[in-house]
Amino acid sequence: MTAKRDPLQPLGPRHQDRPGPAPRLVLGPMLRHVDHDSAVLWVQVSHACQVEWRLRRNGRAERRFTAMTFCVHGRHYALIAAKGLFAGWWYEYDVWAQRRGGALTGVWPDARATGARLPPSSFRTLPSGGGGEVRLAVVSCRAPESHDADGDKEIGVDALKLLARRLKRQYPMRRIAWPQALLEIGDQVYADSVSRAMEAVLKTPHERIGVPVNEVVSFPEFAELYAEAWGDDDIRWMRSCIPSIGIFDDHEIVDDWNINSAWVDEQRAQPWRMARIRAGLLAYWVYQGAGNLAPEAWSGDERMQALRSPGALLAAGKQRDVTRSAESLFARYAVGTRKARWSYERPIGPVRLIVGDCRTRRDLKANRLMDDDEWSWFRDAVLDAKESHLLLVLTLPVLLPDGIRELESSSAASREFPWTLDPLAAIIDAAFEAGEDKPLRRYMQERVDLEHWPAFPASFDDFISLLEDRLMAPGRTTRSLVLLSGDVHFSYCMTARLAKAPGRPVHQFVVSPARNRLSPGNESLFRVMAGPHGRALVDLGRALVAAHGGAGVLPVNPKADATNARIVTTLLSLGGRNLLFDNVFAMLRTGPAGGELRFEAAGGTAGREVEAYGSRTLRPAGRVRVALA
């Protein structure tokens, strides 16, 4: 009779080497940082294993690159770096995986997940040197719902999915039609407003512990959120071909993240809210942030070191379980006892891309969007860039239509100056149900998201000064200077001319959303405030409030007014409209000969055929030229 094994005892060597089920791809492959001689691939797999990335050039096997998975909360990931590639060459590839003691198994292409209808995964390294034209596909703000009539009715047709389908059709012409990268400017997932399907999953466990049923809290829940957002076959294939460049905004964690000091105090008062911020930051780094770095930067980044540390070695494949080390580090980021640099920069041909963090490094006591250290880094990156074409990516717009800008600067003034509890303010508070614990100034700031650069006058003034310094810097030639943003759930384009550099235009392009929808009330508000009478309405509001003894409610902000006098902005027409409220993506083309930004809006008849996505189509929605200085 065979004795029963004690379940508390470790398995013997023979059992440890038993391979078990073959690994499969859970999510990805996703192409991340690509330059002229290297590329990074991200994958999530079902088991601890070694992942092999096989590249082909001109149809012939070229190189193989491998990486061992690491484990976070029972989920298995790998970042594979391919180095020594040829500049400007096209590569096709597939992905293999091998568990310890098992056979090498092909996991991509995966006919079980995507069928056989997708073209091979293919990408191109950047050309050497700084010449040529740069094409970037730009999206932001993509909320989750099913790709059917119900989902379309809820948040509209998915522009990102339609872009993926277009790129698939363009595969034979990819050398001239595809963008060099997909630039995602925040809110790739909505952790604070999940889909109906996700809410049904969260309902019972969240009710049991007393947390909202429509918000994710733990790392495993964030992992499911990313799987839902990126699991669509067309989008998954597109990400395997087009390198993605990203930065987070508030919805990757929770709405209004770090919007004001009162909000921060509320979060810190409840442990589960701080646990959510820690888990969200860690999930962002695992799924998005790590892939923004070039392989040579991995060894010097403490977040990468946390993912690559020995951790607890798992017997099945000698995989690193880095959960404890990563949780410890990201907990310190969440509470602010340790700071990381989430901003970064990189050249793409003749363009210097500088991505700034508008969320984690705020100085709310001084009412600044970036603290001194973060602003110093960003300022130096802009002034030191040798390229003549600059693309400054900031999730929150710097330049806004006049009426909206004035409304935001008034919001800032109401935070800086004493609050006047006059009868009119009390009536307005009651009408908006703001309550004693959330006065009108804070309620309006959070409800209407009045938190962009003009709402932080000192930061706004610093930014205008930075633009002046760059455009007038001796020894620096600036042919084009573009600010690219998202967040606001409507799209627009502006040009600005600075008093100190009148002949050198600055562009503000806002591309938002890829799939979301403003409430009717907010849409009407922004249409009016961006119109020709928007600023006059703010001035009228100030006068009415002042007449009732409430000058502290909508005061004039002297610093903001002084800054506004240094810059003249023009809101450009897009297809006969100044603002686009459609679900859109944009194609930005820029280079030595100039460039343009083209908007494409998602629409068409909503059908229930998910695979064909009904008769949904993209249509041109406007374009503007990138003027050269």
Image (spheres, rainbow, N blue to C red):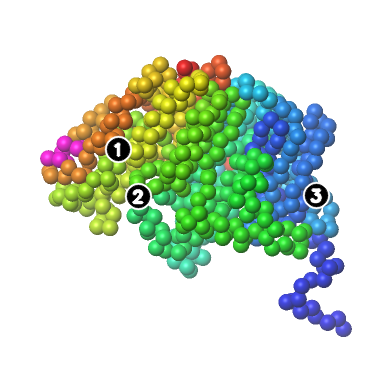
Q: Nearer the viewer, mark 3 or mark 2?
A: 2
Taking the spot 62% from the left edge, 20% from the top edge, the residue there is 132
Badge 2: how crowded within 10 Å, few (<14), some, or many (20+)? few
Q: Is residue 599 above or below residue 72?
A: above
Q: Which residues are magenta?
A: 541-547
The image shows residue 62 at horizontal and vertical percentages of 81, 34
Badge 3: how crowded within 10 Å, few (<14), some, or many (20+)? some
Which circle marks residue 105 in the picture?
Answer: 3
Which circle marks residue 409 in the picture?
Answer: 1
* Towards the viewer: 148 or 538: 538
Taking the spot 79% from the left edge, 52% from the top edge, the residue there is 98
The image shows residue 626 at horizontal and vertical percentages of 48, 20
* Towards the viewer: 9 or 178: 9
Q: Kindly identify the amino acid type of the residue bearing the numbered disc 1.
A: Ser
Which quarter of the picture shows residue 449? Answer: top left
SS type, badge 3: strand
SS type, badge 1: helix
Q: Kindly identify the amino acid type of the residue bearing the numbered disc 2.
A: Lys
Would you name the residue on which mark 2 appears? 365
SS type, badge 2: loop
Count of labels shown?
3
Image marks 2 and 1: residues in contact by CB distance under 8 Å: no
